[in-house]
C-alpha cells in the first residue's frame, strides 16, 4: 500500500479520510434531524399550544440558531471530531469535558438503537407475521455495513433519503392545498392563524417550543465529521448553521400547512401518535401507505447518520485516552473508518430487541440538553473569560449575550 493510500499521523497510524463536501455534511445533518419528525410531534404540541405549532417552531428555531452560532465559533477554534466533548474539555476543563462526553454519549449512542426500535415497530405493523427480531437484526446489519465501508457512502445514501423525504413532503403540501380549496380545515392557505390568533398565548407556545427543540437533535452532530472534512474550520460552521436553518424552515412550513388542515386536535383519535391519521385524512389510504414507507426511509437515514456520529465521538475519546486508545482509537487501514467503534455501536443497537422506547428517549433528551448547555458555556469560558474578549459591546454581544440566549 502506498503512502498516498493512507493518511497517517506522526506515529504512522491511519487517519480518518478527509473527503466530505459542504452539501454532504449538510445532508448528513438533515438526515440526523429527520425532516418528517414534524409529523410525529404535531398532535402533542398542537394540543399544548391550542393550534399554534408553527409559532412554537419559530421560538425553537431562534434558540437553536443561537446555539449553532456558538458551535460555529468553537469549531473554528477546535476543528476536531469530538463535538461538545472536545469544546468543554479544551475551553472549560478536561474533567468537565469528560462529564460532557459521557452525557453526549447517551445522546449519540442510543439514537441508532432508537431508530432500530422505530424500524421494528413500523415493519412489524406492516408485516405482523414476520418475527420482530428479523427486522432488528436486518436493520442493524445494513447500518453497520454501510458505516464500515466509507463515510462518503453514508453521506450519499443519506442524500437520497433526505430527497425522498422532501419529495413526499411536497406531495403532502400539494394535497393539503387541494383539500383547503375544497373547504377542509380553515378553508384557505391565506391565513396566519397557525402563528397568531385570539387563542394564542405566549406561555403555551414557549412550552411547545421546549418540546420541539428536540426535533433539532442532530444539527450539532455534523461537528463529529470535522476530521473527515477538508477546511473544516470554514465548512463545518456553515454546515451547522445551514442544517439548523434548513431543518427549521422545513418544520415551520410543514407544520403551517398541517395546522391549516387540522386547526384543532379534535379530529385525531390518537393525538400523541397522529402521523398515520394525518396521512390518511389528507391523502387517503394509498398515500398513507406510501407515507408510512417513507417514515421507514426516514428512520434508516437517521440511523445511518447517528451511527456515524457516535463512532467518531468514541474515536476521539479513545485517541484522548479517555477510553483505551488501542480499541477506540483504531482506524481501519483500508476503509479509514473507526471500524471497531462502528461494530460496537451496531452491537448496542441490537438492544432494540428488548429496550423500552420511553426510557431511551429520556436518556437522549438529557444528553442533548447537557451538550447544548456546555457548548454555550464553552464560548463564554474560552472567548469572553480566557481570551478577555469582553472590552467592547460587540464582544459582549457575541461571546456573552448570544451564548446565554442559546443556553
Image (spheres, rainbow, N blue to C red):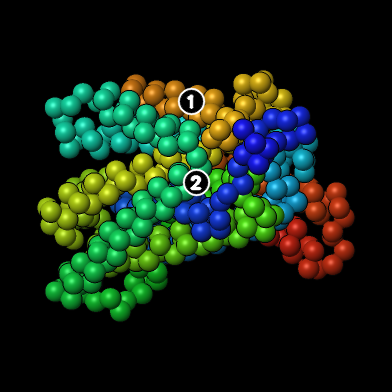
SS for callout 2? helix
Q: Is residue 368 left or right of residue 282?
A: right
The label shown at residue 363 is: none
The residue indicated by pointer 2 is 152
In the rendered image, is residue 199 in sight? Answer: no
* Residue 282 image offset from top left, x and y in percent: 18, 61
Q: Above or below — where is 396 with respect to 8?
A: below
Q: Name which quarter of the figure residue 264 lies in.
A: bottom left
Q: Is residue 385 left or right of residue 403?
A: right
Q: Is residue 336 left or right of residue 153?
A: right
Q: Above or below — where is 73 with respect to 273?
A: below
* Residue 211 image offset from top left, x and y in percent: 45, 49
Mark 1 to mark 2 CA distance (whole Å): 18 Å
The residue indicated by pointer 1 is 343
Tell me which numbered mark, 1 or 2, is placed earlier along the sequence. 2
In the rendered image, is residue 174 in sight? Answer: yes
Foreground residue among 85 and 189: 85
Q: Residue at x 46, y 58 (%)?
A: 247
Q: Residue at x 78, y 68 (%)?
A: 394
* Residue 225 image offset from top left, x and y in percent: 59, 45
Q: Label 1: how many residues lie within 10 Å, few (<14), some (14-19) or many (20+)?
A: many
Amino acid at each position: 500500500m502506498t503512502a498516498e493510500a493512507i493518511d497517517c499521523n506522526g506515529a504512522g497510524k491511519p487517519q480518518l479520510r478527509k473527503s466530505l463536501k459542504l452539501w454532504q455534511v449538510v445532508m448528513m445533518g438533515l438526515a440526523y434531524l429527520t425532516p418528517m419528525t414534524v409529523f410525529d410531534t404535531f398532535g402533542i404540541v398542537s394540543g399544548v399550544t391550542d393550534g399554534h405549532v408553527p409559532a412554537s417552531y419559530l421560538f425553537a428555531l431562534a434558540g437553536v440558531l443561537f446555539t449553532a452560532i456558538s458551535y460555529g465559533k468553537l469549531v473554528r477554534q477546535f476543528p476536531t471530531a469530538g463535538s461538545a466533548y472536545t469544546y468543554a474539555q479544551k475551553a472549560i476543563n478536561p474533567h468537565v469535558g469528560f462529564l460532557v462526553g459521557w452525557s453526549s454519549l447517551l445522546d449519540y449512542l442510543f439514537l441508532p438503537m432508537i431508530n432500530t426500535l422505530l424500524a421494528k415497530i413500523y415493519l412489524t405493523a406492516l408485516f405482523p407475521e414476520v418475527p420482530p427480531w428479523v427486522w432488528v437484526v436486518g436493520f442493524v446489519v445494513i447500518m453497520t455495513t454501510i458505516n464500515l465501508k466509507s463515510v462518503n457512502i453514508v453521506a450519499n445514501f443519506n442524500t437520497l433519503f433526505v430527497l425522498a423525504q422532501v419529495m413526499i413532503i411536497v406531495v403532502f403540501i400539494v394535497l393539503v392545498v387541494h383539500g383547503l380549496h375544497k373547504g377542509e380545515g380553515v378553508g384557505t392557505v391565506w391565513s396566519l392563524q397557525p402563528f397568531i390568533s385570539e387563542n394564542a398565548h405566549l406561555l403555551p407556545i414557549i412550552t411547545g417550543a421546549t418540546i420541539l427543540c428536540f426535533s433539532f437533535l442532530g444539527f450539532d452532530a455534523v461537528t463529529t465529521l470535522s476530521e473527515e472534512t477538508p477546511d473544516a474550520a470554514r465548512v463545518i460552521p456553515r454546515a451547522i448553521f445551514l442544517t439548523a436553518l434548513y431543518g427549521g424552515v422545513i418544520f415551520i412550513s410543514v407544520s403551517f400547512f398541517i395546522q391549516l388542515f387540522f386547526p384543532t386536535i379534535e379530529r385525531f383519535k390518537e393525538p400523541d401518535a397522529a402521523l398515520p391519521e394525518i396521512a390518511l385524512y389528507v391523502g387517503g389510504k394509498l398515500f398513507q401507505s406510501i407515507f408510512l414507507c417513507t417514515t421507514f426511509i426516514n428512520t434508516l437515514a437517521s440511523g445511518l447518520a447517528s451511527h456515524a456520529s457516535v463512532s467518531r465521538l468514541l474515536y476521539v475519546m479513545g485517541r484522548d485516552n479517555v477510553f483505551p486508545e488501542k480499541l477506540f482509537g483504531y482506524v481501519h487501514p483500508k476503509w479509514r473508518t473507526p471500524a471497531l467503534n462502528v461494530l460496537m455501536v451496531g452491537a448496542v443497537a441490537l438492544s432494540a430487541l428488548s429496550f423500552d422506547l420511553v426510557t431511551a428517549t429520556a436518556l437522549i433528551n438529557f444528553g442533548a440538553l447537557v451538550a447544548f448547555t456546555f457548548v454555550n458555556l464553552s464560548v463564554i469560558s474560552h472567548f469572553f473569560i480566557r481570551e478577555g474578549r469582553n472590552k467592547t459591546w460587540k464582544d459582549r454581544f457575541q461571546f456573552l449575550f448570544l451564548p446565554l440566549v442559546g443556553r
